[in-house]
Amino acid sequence: MESLDRRQGSAPRSPRVTAAMVAARAGVSTATVSLVANGKTQGRVSEDNISRVRLAISELGYVVDSIGSSLARGVSSIVILVTPDVSNPFFANVIAGVRESLGSQYQLLLSVTDAGESPQADDVRKLLALRPAGLLVGAPSAEFLEDLSAAGPLVLLDAPGLESYAPSVNLDVAQGARELARHLASSGHTRAAYVDGVTGTTTFQLRREAFLAEAASCGLSVAPGHVISTPIDVGAAAAAFADVWPEWQREGVTAVVCGTDTHAYGVLQEARVEGVRIPEQLAVAGFDDLPYSATSNPSLTSVHLPATPLGRKAGEQLRGLMEGLPLDETHVTLESSLVVRGSTS
């Protein structure tokens, strides 16, 4: 019976190239191939043999079986980063910071959750079969951490209140939220609204609660009916704002604060459709300080959250744990700050 490859008119698959095949081509032992392939030649392999092995690897297209190696050693060079919504530039910057601190010795593997949602232990547990060297988890729940208590070296990102479970790097989102409330109050606003994210993560709760508390102390009123929640999506935020804006306008709302810049982009988009002048009729602000916020029209006032330093510091902490080094600080908190732009002034 013909193989599927032949019946479909394609060439049969080539057999996987092994270390033994490379060794035979180069005229060396498989141990020498392993040393060269894994960059452990110093003082152990001659320059001539290194050149011969590298040539054989190139000619044969050999790829190191890292999974097999990790099974033999009991641990791999893989680091798993559990993060929501990699399409969001904020998380792209977090990833860049992690990669910078881990360097080339570790391979970064992403496990992506739905935008704004806490990770699920079952999803990550499947990846633990790869025997990762360490785990970085963004905005987890306590239940998640209890389920994966034996996962190995672990560092938490943006997980306030969960410091007892593992070393962590958090963002002081409340600081920026309070600055934003004071800025709006000092600009003459007396009635504001808040567009929150539909999410179970603590960071969004802290943003909202800190803003509302400071607003109340500054004489900036935010009525219960002026707080809504939508998914973290421009279209969803625009649609939600379209539904509530006529009522908010009648009730004297002159400022809208959004839990993310993504929400704020949706509000700005719909405000243009409605003919609302920003900031003359309505001030709009967000959180994250994404790159586009500086160039949007108008530019967006936002609470800056240091995404790249967050990833970099978390990666440094995890690397220390994986390499058995003492941590200078077990728990680190990075400051947020308000960036005032054209959408509020």
Image (tube, rainbow, N blue to C red):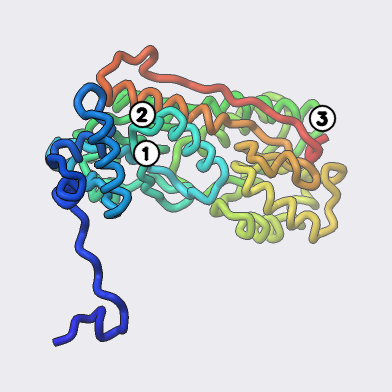
Amino acid under disc 1: Pro
Disc 1 on helix, strand or loop? loop
Quick one: label 1 or label 2, which is nearer the N terminus? 1
- Tell me if residue 218 comes above or below residue 6 in the rendering: above
**Residue 51 can be seen, yes or no:** yes
* Residue of label 3: 187
Q: How far apart are the two marked residues, 2 and 3, measured between alpha carbons?
A: 37 Å
Amino acid under disc 3: Ser
Quick one: label 1 or label 3, which is nearer the N terminus? 1
Occupied quadrant, residue 337: top right
Residue at 52 percent of width and 22 percent of height: 334
Image label count: 3
Horizontal and vertical percent position of residue 220:
72, 32
Amino acid under disc 2: Leu
Is there CB contact under 8 Å for labels 1 and 2? Answer: yes
Q: Nearer the viewer, residue 24 or 92?
A: 24
Disc 2 on helix, strand or loop? loop
> What's the mark number on residue 23?
none
Residue at 52 percent of width and 42 percent of height: 92
Q: Nearer the viewer, residue 278 or 208?
A: 278
* Residue of label 1: 140
**Quadrant housing the C terminus:** top right
Disc 2 packing (10 Å; few <14; some 14–19; many ≥20)? some
Horizontal and vertical percent position of residue 179:
67, 25
* Residue of label 2: 162
Occupied quadrant, residue 342: top right
- Tell me if residue 240 comes above or below residue 304 in the rendering: below
